[in-house]
Amino acid sequence: MEQPVGFVDNGKPHHVCKLWKAVYGLKQAPRAWYLELRTFLIQSGFVNSLVDASLFVFHSGNTLIYTLFYVDDIIITGNDSAKVQEFIEVLSRRFSLKDLDELSYFLGVEATRSNAGLLLNQRKYITDLLHRTNMSSAKPASSPMVTTERLQLSSGTPLTDGSEYRRVVDSLQYLHFTRPDI
């Protein structure tokens, strides 16, 4: 990384600038963002969940507001829409926000509101994964592989780049945790 033009001291050309905040893209940037948002939420009266570090709950009288975030995606909901809107305005004065209105898709989960409540499903996430792995025409099976075939140490072609394989395994693990029935 080089210093921007105009920041180099000609008397000390090998010195560097000290950063006062995290720079987007650096390894520590997500942690710095989490700590900044967490500090703001706690100062605003929210309590950090003991079960999920990304869930914060505000409880005052009959008012409940839940804030769940993952990286820079945030869900804000509660039992008092006026108070939720008020909090969104406070949050937008501190951080740059893009309000997407009603929740429709978050972390691979589709949300559809009906008279009966909120219906959650992962149809799109699963369909996208099947297309990405060229398995959209695969048939359901009771076992993940043929039970009569014997595996060989040298069978198959080694991958030249394992990153796509790791992404698929990560996606399957996520589905396993959120949809143990499949």
Image: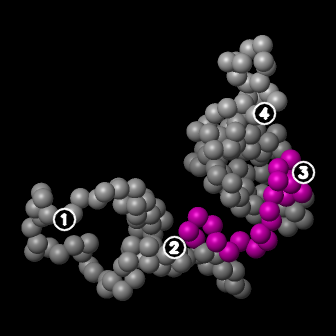
Q: Which type of secondary structure does the marked residue at label 1 adopt?
A: loop
Q: Which type of secondary structure does the marked residue at label 2 adopt?
A: helix
* Total residue callouts: 4
Q: Amino acid at mark 3?
A: Arg
Quadrant of residue 170 within the rendered picture: bottom left
Q: Position of residue 67 (x, y in %)?
A: 72, 55
Q: Which type of secondary structure does the marked residue at label 4 adopt?
A: loop
Q: Amino acid at mark 1?
A: Gly
- Residue at the front extreme, as displayed: 10
Are the residues at dot 2 and dot 1 in contact (C-beta closer than 8 Å)? no
Q: Which type of secondary structure does the marked residue at label 3 adopt?
A: helix
Say whether disc 2 or disc 4 marks the residue closer to the N-terminus: 4
Q: Position of residue 133 (x, y in %)?
A: 39, 73
The residue mark sitting in front, 2 or 4, is: 4
Say whether disc 4 or disc 1 marks the residue closer to the N-terminus: 4
Q: Amino acid at mark 2?
A: Tyr
Magenta segment boundaries in residue numbering: 88-109
* Tag of residue 125: 2
Q: Is residue 96 one of those drawn in magenta? A: yes
Residue identified by numbered label 1: 156
- Mark 3–mark 4 distance (CA, rounded to whole Å): 31 Å
Q: Choose between 16 and 176: the one closer to the eye.
A: 16
